[in-house]
Image (cartoon, rainbow, N blue to C red):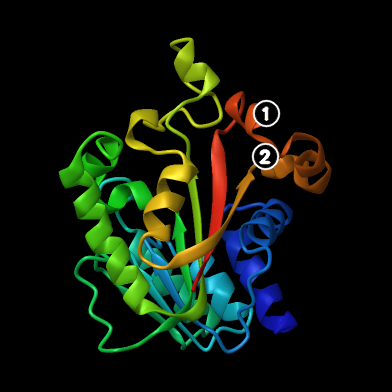
Amino acid sequence: MAGSLDRYFTAMAETGRNPGNLRFELSTFFRGIGFENATVLDIGAGDGYASLYAAAAGAARVVGLSPELDGSWKGAASMFERLRDDLDLKQVVVLRETIQDFEPAGELFDVLISRASINHIDEGACMRLRNDADAVERYMTVFEKLARLAAPGAAIVIKDAMPSNFFGAVGRRNPMMPTLEWHKHQPPNVWADLLSKVGFAQPSIRWTTLNTLRRPGELLFGNRLFSYFTLSTFILTMRRA
């Protein structure tokens, strides 16, 4: 497994990612998650770097959904496939499908990943979640499907942004994430509440810091207040009951 991870980080460096920052990011995102012999579903996988990490870390099967809709970039699925082939991770399947279209034929997953994608499941509904029953129903339909796909005790790991940030509040673009559309997001408690209604439990919410600061930065600044003045991003982990 160590050799596979080394090859993974070398390949990621060739895409322009800083290996040290990426190691910290992934170890933070997947804290407490084991991949050995696991089945993994990556929702909105993009170029697949989380999916490929899971496979390199020992997952037996990884399904990455990379439909290239709004919020993604064109060519992401093709790059995902190329990286998979270069790393010879044959247990990784790339599908250009949304979670709504995905039909696994009875397969269950031990880990479900949503990194910067949960709001893109249905952007229109996401923006109305706190005051529109139809929007809630649209998301509940998807979350009920996720619950059916999750094996007993499965983990769901979500990383996304808050709908508010200091820079937006003062009418400025966030220099660290200048293209992010804050109004298209929801706070973690909204997602935790909806997921709890379909059988996920034990919510854990963590606040992210700049990857360049790594562990010292997390210890000093890994809280909601500091996040509000920087990235406004969180990691929500829950378990299928």
Residue drawn at 26 percent across, 68 percent down: 96
Horizontal side of residue 138 vs 130, given as left or right? left
Rendered image: mark on residue 226? 1
Q: Are marks 2 and 1 in contact (CB under 8 Å)?
A: yes
What's the distance in space between the residues labelled 2 and 1, CA to CA?
A: 8 Å
- Looking at the image, the residue that sits furthest to the top is 170
Q: Secondary structure at mark 1?
A: helix
- Looking at the image, the residue that sits furthest to the left is 134
Residue drawn at 21 percent across, 40 percent down: 124
Horizontal side of residue 193 vs 239, given as left or right? left
Q: Nearer the viewer, residue 32 or 66?
A: 32
Name the amino acid, label 2.
Answer: Thr
Q: Nearer the viewer, residue 110 or 203?
A: 203
Q: Secondary structure at mark 2?
A: loop
**Number of marks in the rendered image:** 2
Horizontal side of residue 152 vs 18, given as left or right? left
Q: Image quarter for residue 31?
A: bottom right
Residue 55 spot, x, y in % from top left? 55, 79
Reading the image, the residue beneath label 2 is 209
Residue drawn at 51 percent across, 18 percent down: 167
Quarter of the picture holding the N terminus: bottom right
Rendered image: mark on residue 157? none
